Amino acid sequence: MTREEAGPRIAKLIEEINEHNFRYYSQAAPSVSDYEFDMLLEELIRLEKEYPDLAVPDSPSQRVGGTITKSFETVRHRYPMLSLANSYSEAEISEFHNRIVKSLEREPVYVCELKYDGLAISLHYENGLLTRAVTRGDGTQGDDVTANVKTIRSIPLRLTGDFPVYFEIRGEIYYPHESFLILNAEREQEGLPLFANPRNAAAGTIKLQDSAEVARRKLDCWLYYLMGENLPFESHYDSLKAAKEWGFRISNNIAICHNINEVFEFIHDWEHGRHNLPFDIDGIVIKVNRFDQQQLLGFTAKSPRWAIAYKYKAEEAVTRLLSVDFQVGRTGAVSPVANLEPVLLAGTTVKRATLHNEDIIKKLDLHIDDMVVVEKGGEIIPKITSVKHEFRKSDSKAINFLSSCPECNTPLERTEGEAAWYCPNSDGCPPQIKGKLEHFISRKAMNVESLGEGRIEIIFDQGLVKDAADLYDLTFEKLIGLEKMYPATEGMKERKISFREKTVDNILNSLEQSKSTPFPRVLFALGIRYVGETVAKKLAEAFGSIDRLMEASREQLIEVHEIGDRIADSLLSYFSDESHRHMIHRLQQSGLQFVMEQTTEKLSNVLEGKSFVISGVFTAFTRDEAKTLIEQHGGRIVGSISAKTDFILAGDQMGPSKKEKAEKLNIRMIDEQTFRLMIGLENN
Ligand code: IVH
């Protein structure tokens, strides 16, 4: 596309994408599929890359991030970001109401809203464009987090309709439950510390330096307060209604209340209703609706006199602690979990509560059979907040943390500064091995779906696999006929999993297909501590192949952007273990991708259609480099020798069985020198 054509096309794409975004996020009524949407966005990003001078600051391509902010600029708020006075009882709300009636000499109309539990944000718009997003900070000045905020899809970058030239709008950035659960599940898999609740996760995310990571995390935002000079509205409610028309995400769960009883009704409705929301709220906010009345009431130093928050108490229940289980996760972290006498709490029956770590058990001074207070606060899983000591029997036994692994008996270890105890036997402790295998086959790693739903567990329990490399030695004969009964559990009927012919075929096929999984995902699949999806990608790009990564020194690792001491140490320790190197070698032999796919142009077609098996070691290149060279010249690598193999690139120390097989099948063996001649690296 020429420059002349690109200009109007970019404008058209932006208009279309903005329209789709608005329909999707503000009206929940999408008119195109996700795929069609992605295609439009991809085209836009491509054109902006080709013609950078045609890119505009409000381009929806900003949604995918890419900016790295080293340190956030401190910005002074034009209007201070105040907080709200809190109240915990209806009596306090009545007092608030009485004060207002006295000052205004009449009953006001109130607006009741949900009190979103996230972090406050101030958005600045000039001529309909989002120009700045600032955190609350200390209320007087906050951090400029514009690049990160621009990745939140529901926040408009460009407004539509009749908006004021300059204004500020405030709201709450939050983590929806669903995204939060996914985030923590991923972090658990990667061995990263979990966020205690969605609020912490939102606050942590908005201060990330890499906006592309923020974009992946799927934050959201509710707007609740329009501010500016000479705004053409008489009331808060009208201003929000208009803001909605300009493209802002304003909740529908807002009520106009003509008297204080209607306010109480709103409070009562959400007391229970809040548990069904897909995000956290910690109360409701009551605001005087009319701006002239707000002005009359004014502010204290800390908060407006025209508004108040009603905070819901975290729901509590008292029940008996029956026992404590210690669970070993994929990373070896041992988590204590309390088994409770079932009790109804916030609409669900609670039977278990997290105890987090040893320090928390000690602090609570927990004994078996204690009556404990369980609370469901911002956290998804309930926790024990205190013990009713008065009910404790004199002979009750204190709960002690284990000193050795409940699964493999290895003495547990605790790193200084960390709260968790770990089982260090990462390659010999059954739940850790099983967890690693589950991670290896998971969707974002090797994506061997047909081994999901408990099948990998059966294969492991049968002793057929001990590590990922064993998966590629599985055969039809080994798998056919395996089965396991799963007894009925709550909400699930008894079920039997059996390996019939079709299942086994599917498993073997998808294992075969997984061999073409790109290197970054293979690296992620290895489950090296702290090497999550993003880190794996960065490492793969920086080093190009597993061979080079395995050889990298601490200094070379740390040189890579965003790779710090912790990740470097984890890599060095992983690769220093001979059994890990051996497993990687076996995976290489099976034909998995351990080299970054070449995005560069092909060098030639001289090896077009030819298949190669690589064996032995070479002097001028590593095996991975040989593989790359073959591919760059149009050839293909296959895992094992068959009658269809065209060449064997044979180095020193080629295995005797391979040699024998090649000779038997009469396959041409070429040495390093001949290979170099073939691809024109050397002349005769
Ligand atoms: S209005 C002058 N409305 O609560 C303060 N705040 O303690 C005007 N919040 O910092 C704030 N939901 O982060 C308002 N519907 C809502 C809210 C809300 C949550 C937060 C906000 C504020 C804090 C006040």
Image (tube, rainbow, N blue to C red):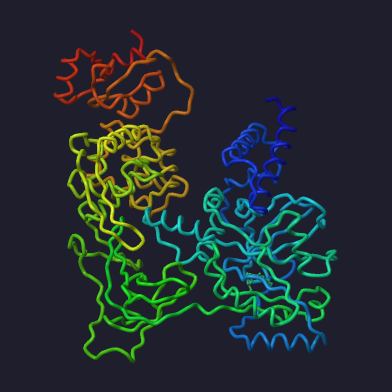
- Judge left or right: residue 87 versus residue 614: right
Residue 266 makes an appearance in the image? yes
- Residue 430 location, x and y as percent? 22, 54
Q: In which quadrant will I find the N terminus?
A: top right
Reply above or below: 497 against 43: below
Q: What is the tally of numbered marks visible in this picture?
A: 0
Residue at left offset 24%, top offset 58%:
424
Q: Residue furthest front?
A: 493
Most foreground residue, 356 or 67: 356
Q: Give the image quadrant in which the ligand numbered 1 is located.
A: bottom right
Residue 294, image x and y in percent? 79, 77
**Which residue is situated farthest in the top direction here?**
684
Provide residue 180's location: percent of width, then percent of height.
49, 59
Q: Residue at x 71, y 42 (%)?
A: 56
Figure check: 361 above or below 450? below
What x and y, as percent, mark residue 420?
32, 66
Q: Nearer the viewer, residue 472 or 229?
A: 472
Q: Quadrant of the C terminus?
A: top left
Q: Residue at x 74, y 69 (%)?
A: 79
Which image quadrant for residue 360?
A: bottom left
Q: Is residue 499 left or right of residue 90?
A: left
Q: Is residue 585 visible?
A: no
Query: Height in image: 92 above or below 110?
Result: below
